[in-house]
Image (tube, rainbow, N blue to C red):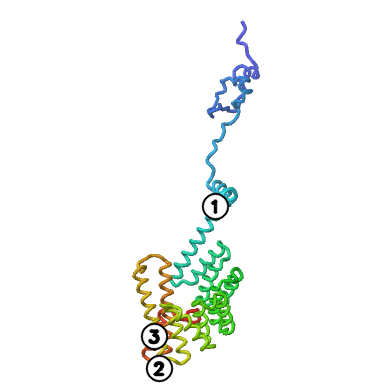
Amino acid sequence: MSGPRLHSPSQNRGVNAGPPEEAMRYDRDGFPIPPAFDLPDPATAEAGLPSPDTPPPRRRGRPSWRKRLVVLALLAGLVIPGLLGPQLMPTIRAAVVNWSLDRAYACQAADDVGGAITHLSRAVDWHGDHPDLLCMRALLRLENRDPQAALEDLRQAAAIAPLATQPLRIRAVAHVVLGEADAAIAAADRAAELAGDESAAALNHRAYIRGLVSRDLETALADIERAVAGESDPPPAYVDTHGFLLHLVGRHQEAIDRLNLAISAMQGQRRDFARRFGRSRSTAAAVRLREIDQSLAVMHHHRSLACRAVGLAGQAEQDEAVAREKGFDPSRGIL
């Protein structure tokens, strides 16, 4: 009787060990497929479905904030301006100019002349050279003790508007600050020529410039008397010029009388303006009050000169103190 039939080790492996171990496979949802499962039908693969051997796809996350920022920057910097720029730029330009002017007024009202110049320069850059804006900046630069920069603004303004008188009038004051009497008179004469001999404002300005440089005082007095005679109620500034010139030609008591009238009228204007706009938050109102105070500073200075000339030292000192308090300063064009 024969014993049990024995198999070689290789045969044992072929019968009992099963198929060789394969790598783990995954279905389309990422779950592992046991080795005993059949492979999908070849037709399925041809239809474009993923193979069981293909690892599950990685889920794509949302774009990072950096990528979104780059896209937005490209849109803002290239696409949107190209599409909307021609239509929107005039509106944007006007908004920037108006905002810059508001900020300039606010700085000026707060005696921040440097800040006012910075904001006004932005308005000039966005608007383009405009004689009114250039004249405004020239006045601020004078007040900031930079008469040469003021003159450059005034040259540009005159080049744009050669028949305008305002650049010439401010230019005359700048030359006075620089001690250039001949140039100051030439600018004042040219402004009066353009305005016409019957212009009271031109006569007042020409007379005042001559008084500041002490030239042709009798001619200057004749100019201002013509200007005042042509006004039923002359502005306080004209009356002040008249009083100042009367003092310069030695008629001191008459000068004091005229300067008293000028100061009283200007104080009345200030009271009326403060009553109407004193509580207003308008920066333009604050700037106007500041301008009135500077005019009063000049008038008090003129009266101090006349009072000192007739021996009224106490009144002269009082006027000088008020003038300093309100901002009188020839180096800043407040003269």
Q: Is residue 142 above or below residue 210?
A: above
Marks 2 and 3, how far apart at CA: 14 Å
User: Separation of disc 3 and disc 1 at Cα?
Assistant: 54 Å
**Residue indicated by mark 3:** 319
Q: Earlier in the sequence, mark 2 or mark 3?
A: 2
Q: Quadrant of the N terminus?
A: top right
Q: Is residue 314 left or right of residue 152?
A: left
Q: Residue at x 51, y 77 (%)?
A: 198
Which residue is at the front of the view, 266 or 74?
Answer: 266
Of circles 2 and 3, the one toward us is 2
Task: Give the residue type at disc 2.
Answer: Val
The kind of residue on which mark 3 rests is: Asp
The quadrant holding residue 317 is bottom left
Residue 141 on image: x %, y %: 53, 74
Residue at image position (51%, 59%) is: 96
The one nearer the camera, 264 or 45, is: 264
Query: Considering depth in this image, is 5 or 27 the residue closer to the camera?
Result: 27
Q: Is residue 73 left or right of residue 323?
A: right
- Which secondary structure, mark 3? helix
Q: CA distance from mark 1 to mark 2?
A: 65 Å
N-term mark: 1 or 2:
1
Q: Which mark is residue 88?
A: 1
Tag 2 residue: 310
Quick one: label 1, few (<14), some, or many (20+) residues within 10 Å?
few
The amino acid beneath tag 1 is Leu
